[in-house]
Amino acid sequence: MADSESDTISYVIVVRDTSLNARSLFCERFPNHRGGVNPRTHSPYSSVPCEIEEISEFLGWIAQNLSNQYSSICIVINIGTPRTWSSFEVPEKILESIREYGTKLNVLFSSPAIN
C-alpha cells in the first residue's frame, strides 16, 4: 500500500461455527475478544483483534486448543484509506500463517463517503 499517514490497517482473527466449549476457552485466552452470530447462517463466531506479530502465535493456540471445535478460521485485514483506490501487498508473515494453519484471508478496504 502506498504510504499515507491517514491510512489505517488492522488485523482480526475470526473463528467460525465455534462450539460452546470453544467460545469459553477463546474468551479465557483472549479477554479482548468479540463474538456474535452470523445473521444469515445463525452460526456463532468469535474474533480477536491482533497485531501482525501475534497472528502466528494466536493461530497456533487456536489450532492446538480448539481443534475440531470450529468450522473455519479467517484472517481479516481491514484497510481504511481516504482515497478512492488503494493497493495492498499481503505481508509474508501472514502468507506463511495462512499456509501453516490453512486459514482463509479476507482483505477489506473502506473509505469515507464522498458527498
Image (cartoon, grey):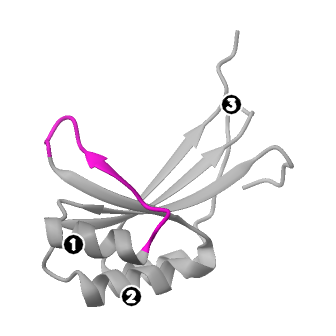
Amino acid at dot 2? Gly
Please say whether residue 80 is one of the residues in the magenta stretch.
Answer: no
Q: Which range of residues does the magenta coloring cover? A: 30-42
The number of numbered badges drawn on the structure is 3
Residue corresponding to mark 3: 84
Q: Earlier in the sequence, mark 1 or mark 2?
A: 1
Residue corresponding to mark 1: 22
Q: Nearer the viewer, mark 1 or mark 2?
A: 1
Amino acid at dot 3? Thr
Q: Is residue 103 above or below residue 64?
A: above
Amino acid at dot 1? Ala
Please say whether residue 41 is one of the residues in the magenta stretch.
Answer: yes
Residue 80: % across, % down: 66, 43
Does residue 20 appear in the picture of this structure? yes
Q: On the image, which quarter does residue 111 sit in?
A: top right
The Cα atoms of the two marked residues, 1 and 3, are separated by 39 Å
Look at 14% across and 42% down and name the residue there: 42
Instruction: Specify whether 6 is left or right of 56.
Output: right
Residue 79: % across, % down: 62, 48
Residue 44: % across, % down: 20, 52
Residue corresponding to mark 2: 60
